[in-house]
Amino acid sequence: MAISDSLQVTKTRIAAACVAAGRAPDAVRLLVVSKTFPAAAVREAFEAGARAFGENYVQEGLAKIEALGELRRELDWHLIGPLQSNKTRPVAEQFDWVHSVDRLKVAQRLSEQRPPQLPPLNICLQINISGETSKSGLLPAEVATLAHQVAALPRLALRGLMAVPEPGPGALAQHQAMAALFAALQAEGLALDTLSLGMSADLEDAIRAGSTMVRVGSAIFGAR
Ligand SMILES: *Cc1c(COP(=O)(O)O)cnc(C)c1O
């Protein structure tokens, strides 16, 4: 299937899931995950209307940002993969969003290194909602403390939470636990608007639970 067609199919899936959940059809933003696919594929998705792209690996993302430099003002680039504290500078300088912050040190460096002429860097805190030891992210009990610390950093805009729930019969409960965590932080007075939850295989569960941004790769570009 052409990228423009699979993008349309994905948008239709998202809208249908919103309707099924009793939510407005435009309540959920689409982040197109372009990791492992070339800049030409990103350009094709851009021409079909996509405006936000997610990358997992810093070097690969930077190469695509550079290759598509003439589109820079029209696109938002999101880092959704793990970020080590010694790699923060180019991310602070080049990306618009980071979804994978799970340590204060990384957040502090991103804030210090964000160039003053750019708007604040948008941040989601990554939660290890399945509790698997192999997964990155904060444990739910650790989130509130870090959220208040990150919200106080001058060059960052804390937007919300991100997670990759473990597929299987317990998946919907994990999506719902993320939505509860998100609501609890809002109730503490944090002005959060982004629950980054749901991928190609589970975006319906995520939208049912309350996701506001789904991150979709293989359903648009094909298998990696
Ligand atoms: C790869 C990836 C995605 C997209 O996954 P698909 O199954 O291809 O839709 C979303 N989020 C993260 C963090 C990823 O690493």
Image (cartoon, rainbow, N blue to C red):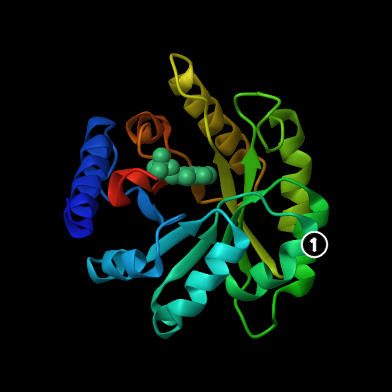
Q: Residue at x 52, y 29 (%)?
A: 165
How busy is the neighbourhood of tag 1: few (under 14 within 10 Å), some, or many (20 plus)?
few
Left or right of residue 6: residue 107? right
Is residue 50 shown above or below 7? below
User: Could you say where residue 63 lies in the image, as x and y percent from the top left?
Assistant: 53, 72
Q: Is residue 54 visible?
A: yes
Secondary structure of residue under mark 1? helix
Disc 1 marks which amino acid?
Asn
Vertical placement of 148 versus 70: above or below?
above
Q: Position of residue 90 (x, y in %)?
A: 68, 72
Residue 212 appears in the figure: no
> What is the x, y in percent for residue 117?
64, 85
Q: Residue at x 59, y 43 (%)?
A: 186
Q: Which residue is mark 1?
A: 86
Q: Which quarter of the rendered picture does the C terminus lie within?
A: top left
Considering depth in this image, is 18 or 12 the residue closer to the camera? 12
